[in-house]
Image: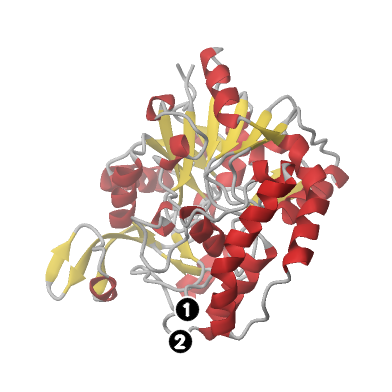
Amino acid sequence: MANVVVVGAQWGDEGKGKIVDWLSERADVIARFQGGHNAGHTLVIGKEVFKLHALPSGVVRGGKLSVIGNGVVLDPWHLIAEIATVEAQGVSITPENLMIAENTPLILPVHGELDRAREEAATRGTKIGTTGRGIGPAYEDKVGRRSVRVADLADDRTLEARVDRALQHHNPLRKGLGIDQIDRDALIAKLHEIAPKILPYAAPVWRVLAEKRKAGKRILFEGAQGALLDIDFGTYPFVTSSNVIAGQAATGVGLGPTAIDYVLGIVKAYTTRVGEGPFPSELHDKEGQRLGERGNEFGTTTGRKRRCGWFDAALLRQTCATSGITGICLTKLDVLDGFEKIKICVAYDMDGERLDYLPMAAEEQARCLPIYEEIDGWSEKTGGARTWADLPAAAIKYVRRVEELIECPVALVSTSPEREDTILVTDPFAD
């Protein structure tokens, strides 16, 4: 038995959905451990394209248990709408194949309103680039001990007490931002309406997973976003509101750290970022535009154009350490087809000093310039490759050089959005 954590090792959008789906064939349980519906996973199953935001990627595979853990903040209205969309595509979702942790905090309409109002009020240069879906304010309420959680939907008295506590905090904030006060009765009515649609999925997830583990079942832990957006180890303050790194996988579902056997980091063969924040290897030229066009770099959730740049090995070495990554999956290798020369950022120059990591201070990050190593590209096609023999020698050389620079082995290589276009080097689920 082996339990595997999948984390994005850059700024998100690395292709986690496809890889989680690919690995889910070997897993018995797929558990989402953090984030909200601000992150999107695109899965291509035959001719069907699934765009998931709140649901774990494993729901599209029959015979698997999908779990939304307590580390997630959940918009119940979005979840029910997403379930309806997926079922319209032929996937059955029931309490037998989807469970939600009873202690999962809910994203309420007030959270999205506050999120958007803050972003609109922020001056240029201080905007975080939030999706405006309420994830940040929901996490704030969680740590402020004023969340409405899934279990609260089952008891009217508890639910009303939770709403009253939240309003004591939110109404003064809204007054300062010029937003109307919250209609308490209308909010409670909305929660009463959604409760019978959510409660059938509620379960003591920590207990279910502990039993699955004792029975020798394989658990696949799925994260959202990327490690460089981690609230502690990301490019703060341009980060998400939760811990994204692999250590969160255990806390986010209610298991101990000994439940984790393998950490797979998902990494693009180049680097992208959505929204604000530092990006040392970003390209503002034709090569950056070419990467974006060939990689179809638009956010699954927001549709926003992604910023593109060369592969940053210094950052990857950093996230491999903070997430304890065992092996990486290198995705979108085919996007680099046809580049005569390819650059890799190996370190940074900060005022004449060479750094092999990105410092935490925002002011220092802004002064870091990329130091590049250049290697030969390839003209042959790698798209659709499924074995090492299908790859040109120069592409293999690129992969091997990435391994050396990030000090972590490549376990898989993805060469297209198609599920089967994956080269397996090391099976993360191998006992």
Counting every numbered tag in the picture gives 2
Type of colouring: secondary structure
Percent coordinates x, y for residue 226 in the rendering: 46, 53
**Position above or below: 318 against 361:** above
Q: Name which residue type carries label 2.
A: Arg
Q: Is 363 situated left or right of 223 in this image?
A: left
Q: Name which residue type carries label 1.
A: Lys
Q: Which mark is residue 327?
A: none
Q: Residues within 10 Å of mark 1 (few under 14, many from 20)?
A: some
Q: CA distance from mark 1 to mark 2?
A: 6 Å
Percent coordinates x, y for residue 197 in the rendering: 81, 44
Query: Residue extending furthest top?
Result: 215
Q: Residues within 10 Å of mark 2 (few under 14, many from 20)?
A: few
* Camera-nearest residue between 37 and 367: 37
**Position above or below: 274 against 375:** below
Percent coordinates x, y for residue 19 in the rendering: 57, 40
Q: Is residue 190 visible?
A: yes
Q: Which residue is mark 2?
A: 124
Q: Which residue is mark 1?
A: 127
Disc 1 vs disc 2: Cβ atoms closer than 8 Å?
A: yes
Percent coordinates x, y for residue 76 in the rendering: 72, 52
